[in-house]
Amino acid sequence: MRRRETNEQELSTLAIQALVWVLGEDSRAQRFLSLTGLEPDDLRTRLTDPDMHEAIRLFLEGHQPDLLACADALGVKPELLLPEPKEHWA
């Protein structure tokens, strides 16, 4: 399934599933919180926030072993967990 064929609801669901996976290991969860500057309460209140989903995708993009392991755990292609390409970089 290509990214364009995946609707926003599916992408949101994947981002939340990826967050659960990220938080499943203490060292990885701490790295995520440190790199993003988020707090545990932020995770709860912003669970459906597209910016939060983007932070999760960027986190996975930044460390290929996590990206591949998360994709494997969720049973999806790694590309589905990556952020959308930016078309207009300044």
Image (spheres, grey):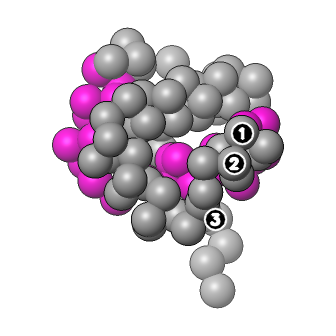
Q: Which is more N-terminal, label 1 or label 3?
A: 1
**Would residue 8 be seen by someone viewing this image from the given angle?**
yes
The magenta segment is 47-72
Q: Is residue 75 magenta?
A: no
Q: Amino acid at mark 1?
A: Arg
Where does the image place residue 60, in percent across and percent down from the top left?
A: 39, 47
Would residue 48 be found to the left or right of residue 76 on screen? right
Q: Which residue is mark 1?
A: 44
Few, some or many C-alpha atoms within 10 Å of disc 3 (few <14, some 14-19, many ≥20)? few
* Residue matched to label 3: 87
Q: Which residue is mark 2?
A: 41
- The residue located at (76%, 24%) in the rendering is 9
> Which residue is found at the position 71% from the left and 39% from the top?
44
Q: CA distance from mark 2 to mark 3?
A: 32 Å
Query: N-terminal of the two: label 2 or label 3?
Result: 2
Q: Amino acid at mark 3?
A: Glu
Expressed as whole percent of the image width and height from the top left, the position of residue 24 reads 38, 29
Q: Nearer the viewer, mark 3 or mark 1?
A: 1
Instruction: Determine the secondary structure under disc 2.
Output: helix
Question: x, y percentage for residue 20?
Answer: 50, 28
The disc at residue 6 is none
Q: Position of residue 27 (x, y in %)?
A: 28, 47
Q: Are marks 2 and 1 in contact (CB under 8 Å)?
A: yes
Q: Secondary structure at mark 3?
A: loop
- The residue at 26%/34% (across/down) is 68
Q: Quadrant of the C terminus?
A: bottom right
Kind of residue sitting beneath label 2? Asp
Residue placed furthest toward the left = 65
